[in-house]
Image: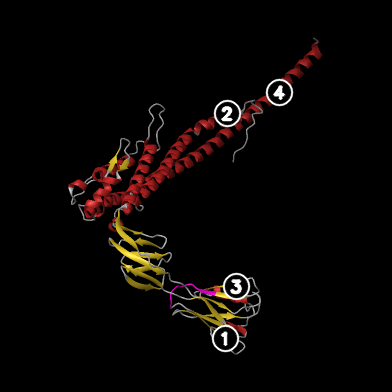
Amino acid sequence: MAFSVGGLASGLDTESIISQMMDLERRPILQLQRREATFQSKISALGALKSELSAFQTTAAALTEPDGFIAYSAVSGNSSVLTASASADASEGSYQIEVNSRAASQMVRSASFAGADEVVGTGTLTIQVGSEASVDITIDADNQTLAGIAQAINASDAGVSAAVVDDGTGNVYLALAASATGADNTISLTMADDDGVNTDAAGLSSLYDDPATQSLFETRAAANAQLSLNGIDVERADNSVSDLIDGVTLDLKDADPGTPFTLTVSQSYSAITGKVEKFVEAYNSLVDLFGTLQKYDSETGESGVLQGDSTTRQLQGRLVNLLYAGVDGVPSDINSLSKLGIALDRDGKMSLDSDVLTSAIENNGSDVITFFTNTEEGNKGIAVQFDEMLDSYLSGSGSVLSAKEEGLQSSIDSIGEQIERINYRLSLKEENLRNQFLALEGLMAEYEATSGALEQQLTSLAQLSESIYGK
């Protein structure tokens, strides 16, 4: 336990002396703390590098998938009537299409009621849409009004939406609309009315679907879409049609009978070009980070956190080597990134000539795919090589960068232990110094007390001498 030594006897500022002496003793701790901060900065820098490398690896991995190179576009000659999308399963071709009518969902309404809060009745309401499973809805004292029934239907997941509609002339209706389109998806309502009669116009059965009682009225008929493909009339229950043209989905937006138009499906290179552009952008971002971490200013002497780090230099060198690497098994005019329009500038950044890449794909698509995606040992595609090399730096606790981080963390832990040992030793030394100064103060106090007593005795002796012998 530290205690204060005041210096009352000696007149020394002992606290200041002890503090200065201990500051000198703590200099090794300051040096260790600076090393610790340096190691911590390197760990943070490696974390940023891993994040940037991971983003770059993602773009490289996207280029290892052969399916990603095969893309098609579907262009409608009348996009206000029909739009389309194409998958990798599509084929190039042109199609004549005419949309005569869109598919529709059935809508019905009840007979009129006086208001939304009018009590209808209680029992069990059963709703079925087309061939789907029927859904039972309990109507009791809590939801027996027209509004309550609408809410219960909407909460039931019966494939029907319900609304209470006021026409503004004193008539309020329960309006129902099927969620699914198509002629077969009609709405059926039956009920078990608590009044014991299920088919009359009283109680819950006032919603019974029976033309004789005129309790439900159809306001829109369920209907299939009517269209023609290359002059062949077809019907579909939905306005999204994916089974007419392989790999193509048609979305019917409107009808325009008697006005056919052309749908063109063609191979698109925008997807692969976009992936290569992301690859280039991610690499250039990585180059910027390397520049920050490894910089050195000879005038100011300032350097990046990882300046001179061998692991980082090796990684950057391996990346550059791969950029210049060739791939066997493909024609010589497309066997390197530079021949596909990807070049390095003076700053070490990549640039992409999209026209060169597109031309290579158009003229030699399968070989371009092989150049990027081949997984054959000894002849791997360039994207596969990048992906695997980056994996060795990033994947798992045994990866190169993880091992580097673990080594730095081990050094930080060791420094922490050294500081702890030094602090313990210094605490003992400080306590010893305080004890020594305390002992000094005690001796000085005794000396002053003895000196005072002697002086007093001499004064008394002088006074006695004067009294006997006179001055």
N-terminal of the pair, mark 2 or mark 1, is 2
Q: Tell me the element at label 2.
A: helix
Which label belongs to residue 17? 2
Count residues near mark 4 (Cα–Cα under 10 Å), then give few for <14, some for 14-19, many for 20+.
Answer: few
Amino acid under disc 4? Gly
Which label belongs to residue 261? none
Which of the pair 147/223 is nearer the observer?
223
Q: Tell me the element at label 1.
A: loop
Q: Which residue is mark 1?
A: 213
Count residues near mark 1 (Cα–Cα under 10 Å), then give few for <14, some for 14-19, many for 20+.
Answer: some
Q: Tell me the element at label 4.
A: helix
Which of the pair 388/461 is nearer the observer?
388
Amino acid under disc 1? Thr
Tell me the chief SS of the magenta region.
loop
Give the residue at x 47% y 73%: 105
Q: Is residue 306 visible?
A: no
Magenta span: 176-183
**Residue 38 against residue 174 in the figure, above or below:** above
Give the residue at x 24% y 52%: 362
CA distance for labels 3 and 1:
21 Å
Q: Is residue 201 visible?
A: yes
CA distance for labels 2 and 4:
28 Å
N-terminal of the pair, mark 4 or mark 1, is 1
N-terminal of the pair, mark 3 or mark 1, is 3
Give the residue at x 50% y 32%: 25
Please name which of the two marks, 4 or 1, marks the residue nearer to the observer.
Answer: 1
Q: Which residue is mark 4?
A: 452
CA distance for labels 4 and 3:
110 Å
Q: Which residue is mark 3?
A: 164
Taking the view exactly as shown, the residue that stands out farthest to the bottom is: 196
Residue 466 is covered by the magenta coloring: no
CA distance for labels 3 and 2:
90 Å
